[in-house]
């Protein structure tokens, strides 16, 4: 890990670092948005599977 920071010529400035962090954060927020609710029939099937799983333990 220390090798990553050994060469000062490869460091980026604070402004560039902040821009990269902001861009990564925005992409994560977009990709990790909550999934829309399942259609009713799929939700019912999921509930049935959960119930069967609980009953089997």
Image (cartoon, rainbow, N blue to C red):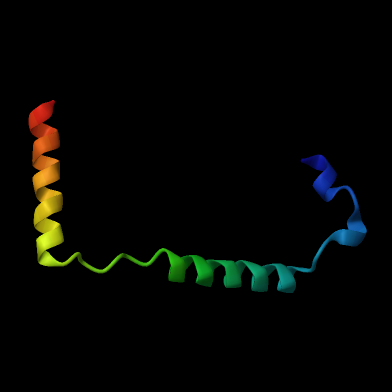
Task: Out of 56 and 1, give the one closest to the viewer.
Answer: 56
Q: Which image quadrant is residue 24 in?
A: bottom right
Residue 14 place in picture, x, y as percent: 74, 68
> Where is 46 relative to 29, above or below?
above
Task: Out of 18 and 50, give the one closest to the viewer.
Answer: 50
Task: Out of 52 and 20, give the one closest to the viewer.
Answer: 52
> Where is 53 relative to 7, above or below?
above
Residue 9 place in picture, x, y as percent: 92, 60
Q: Where's the C terminus, which quadrant?
A: top left
Residue 17 place in picture, x, y as percent: 70, 67
> Where is 49 relative to 55, above or below?
below
Residue 16 in the figure: left or right of residue 7? left
Q: Residue at x 49, y 65 (%)?
A: 28
Q: Residue at x 14, y 44 (%)?
A: 49
Residue 1 place in picture, x, y as percent: 77, 40
Q: Which image quadrant is residue 38 in?
A: bottom left
Q: Residue at x 14, y 35 (%)?
A: 53
Q: Residue at x 87, y 60 (%)?
A: 10
Residue 13 in the figure: left or right of residue 29? right
Task: Out of 29 and 31, give the one closest to the viewer.
Answer: 31
């Amino acid at each position: 890990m220390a090798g990553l920071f050994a060469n000062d010529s490869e460091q980026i400035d604070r402004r560039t670092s902040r821009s990269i962090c902001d861009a990564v954060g925005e992409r994560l927020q977009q990709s990790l948005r909550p999934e829309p609710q399942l259609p009713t029939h799929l939700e019912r099937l999921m509930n049935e599977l959960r119930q069967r799983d609980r009953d089997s333990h």
